Amino acid sequence: MSEEERLRKSENQSMRKSRVGNRYFRIDPGYDRAVYENTCGNWVRIIFTFFLFYIFVVFFWWACYSHGIRHVDSATWLYIGMLIVSWVIIVILIIIGHYSNKNLHKADRLRLEINEEKKKRREEEEKKRKREEAMKELKRQEALAMKDSLSDAGYERDVRRARDEDDSPDDQEGYDSESAATPSSEDE
């Protein structure tokens, strides 16, 4: 391993170690210490954010209370306006959520249909491939059978021809077909 590769591997290991720490078990690749583990600095940030939020809430309600005590008529209309704006925002959120869920369900249904169609196509391709392989095997076996039958027939023909040539009466001298067929009186 070259020096550059060793250095790159060392950097990757140190980055991984700083991200997930030392573990004796395998960690999910999406694990992030900043999200799942709290350090002292993280605790301070959480507490600071908590107090900042509630300080803002306290000042808001103090302002609403103070305005309601000093200017009752304008505070009433302000609160009615806030209520109406809140209702409008809630209705908008419900409508957006409805269309979002509708689109999500449609996307899920389409994804499911696409996966089913892909599965059908894969199965058809697999059947077609197996059918083609079976046809190739059948043709190969037919070719082998034809070759064997031709070679067997040729072999048998050659054997018959050789036997006929060896046993033919024309080729043998002194062979009498009549004496071979009937026993002579000398043989008895």
Image: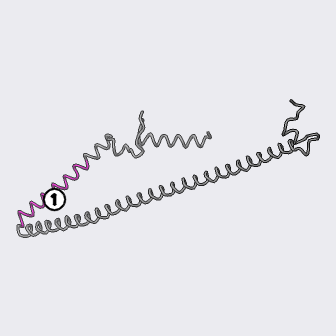
Q: Main secondary structure of the magenta part?
A: helix
In-front residue for pair 20/100? 100
Q: Amino acid at mark 1?
A: Phe
Kindly identify the residue that appears in the image at 83 percent across and 42 percent down.
Answer: 163
Q: Residue at x 19, y 64 (%)?
A: 90
The location of residue 143, given as percent across then percent down, is 67, 52
Q: Nearer the viewer, residue 71 or 57?
A: 57
Quadrant of the rendered image containing residue 129: bottom right
Q: Is residue 113 above or below residue 36?
A: below
Position of the C terminus by quadrant: top right
**Residue 61 horizontal/vertical position (percent):** 13, 58
Residue identified by numbered label 1: 60
State which quadrant residue 3 falls in.
Answer: top right
Farthest residue, direction right: 173
User: x%, y% of residue 111?
Assistant: 38, 60
Q: Residues within 10 Å of mark 1 (few under 14, many from 20)?
A: few
Q: Is residue 62 magenta?
A: yes
Q: Secondary structure at mark 1?
A: helix
In the figure, is residue 14 to the left or right of 82? right
Span shown in magenta: 48-71
